[in-house]
Image (tube, rainbow, N blue to C red):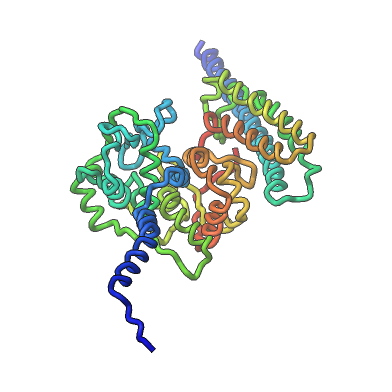
Amino acid sequence: MKEIKPSPILSVLAFWFLFLLFTPLAASENNLFKLTPDIPAGKYLFQAAGGCGCHTDTKNNGVFLAGGRPIKTPFGTFYGTNITPDPETGIGNWSDDDFIKAMTQGMSPEGVHYFPVFPYTSFQGIRRKDLLDLKAYLFSIPPIRQKNIPHELILPFGEQYALMFWKNFIWSPQPFKSNPENTKSWNRGAYLAQTVAHCGECHTPRNLLGVLKPEMHFAGSKEGPEGELAPNITPHKQTGIGSWSEVDISYFLQTGMKPDGDDAQGLMGEVIEFGYQNLQEKDLYSLAEYLLSLEAISNELNTDLSN
Amino acid sequence: MIHIKTITALSALFFIVIFGNSAFAQSEGMIKYRKNVMKSTGGHMGAIIDILKNGLPLTAHIVDHARSINQNNKMTLSMFPKGSGLGDTKAKLAIWENWAKFESAANASVRESAKLAKVAESGDMGAFAKQVRATGKTCRGCHKTFRERN
């Protein structure tokens, strides 16, 4: 029998045949890998973040996301910044990396440290793809030319050296870690609650250095932003939301209506109205599943629920 | 003369104390009363959303709850007479400083809860769920401006 030897010409042809056959697939996968930003997905994340209301001066009929809203804190008064894609007064000139640096490291493209009233302390756990989608959404809204108002802070809190010190020595960012022992839905809820929805920024009390107390995770704070009390949202029966069911939480985040028929006010009312109410029921249930799985911490904040 | 002056002063003081006290007592009573009415409104609303959220086989009850909310809402304006802002209350003084706005916010809740009762009678649960949210919005609308937050 004659031995069949692969001819070199045939081999080359076969190589090219196979190469051309798989190239389009490889190329499209490569595009997927490069992550074309998805504007609707970005809008959804924006809503999951509560609608970023600090950047809209709603009370004075300010333009959407053009900044100017005063935010009173124990450290002074901040003014929400313009995050519309205006190149001069907004974030229109930011590159992807600029945006990611701002959201995860709290630093402007010019290297200015942000005060953590901007919750990059939570946002740092958002996945890169989600951040890029969010950026794509922000870049799709109308650019507004409106200069930022300088913050009015009590010294030395706004000083760059103080912020640098705080970031390097006091704040220790915890990357978001999913827990394979829990359900997919629980992990989704944990991701949303801890990063995008940034619940802890109001619902976890801070120490004197402004760092969230990990042992009081979501146990409520008397000194939330704008002087508001943020209730205990751990499943503690008497002082938290231990008597709420998953459906109660989901319905509340959709409508702002508590199980006792009362309504959410203040910042919570806002984040529901401009954000959370648009979330898919599946995600609301994930959030509920996560919240009800937390350690029940007793923390009485004297929330008088009567009128 | 001094004698008369003292008596006048004393009786004036007496008058103020008694009158002031009774005005305060009335204000306190009014505050307690309206808290109870508001709580019952919240109770009916809570009951309605319990039926909706949990799919309870009590849809026959929603008409009564909705009517009760509407009845309560009709009481709102008369529960906030001038001078009833003192005491253990979250009612903001803005109510009396801006009565017209308060009136229109309170009337909105009367209007929407009347619709709520109508939709409840129709038995269309989808429309009812929507109207619950619309009614809730008017509760929130009034509380937002006129109720102290913490």
Residue positioned 70% across, 26% down in the render:
B74
| Foreground residue among A1 and A102 | A1
A231 or A201: nearer the viewer: A201
> Where A278 sits versus A70, above or below?
below
**Image: A130 above or below A1:** above
- Name the residue nearer the viewer: B50 or B19: B50
Q: Percent from the top left, x then y, of residue A244? A: 61, 54
Q: Is residue A265 left or right of residue A165?
A: right
Disc tally is 0
- Compared across the picture, whether A128 is left or right of B101 comes to left
In the displayed structure image, the side of residue B80 where residue A176 appears, left or right: left
The image quadrant where one finds the C terminus of chain A is: top right
Please, which residue is most extreme toward the right here? B60
- Specify the quadrant of the image occupied by residue A145: top left
Q: Residue at x 45, y 49 (%)?
A: A197
Residue A151, horizontal then vertical, whole percent: 28, 35
Examine the rendered structure and indicate whether residue A93 appears above or below residue A235. above
At x 35%, y 82%, the residue is A4
Q: Is residue A301 visible?
A: yes
Q: Can you give x and y, in whole percent of width and height, for residue B90 in the image?
A: 55, 34
Give the residue at the far left of this rendering. Answer: A161
Of B1 and B49, nearer the camera is B49
Q: Residue at x 53, y 62 (%)?
A: A293
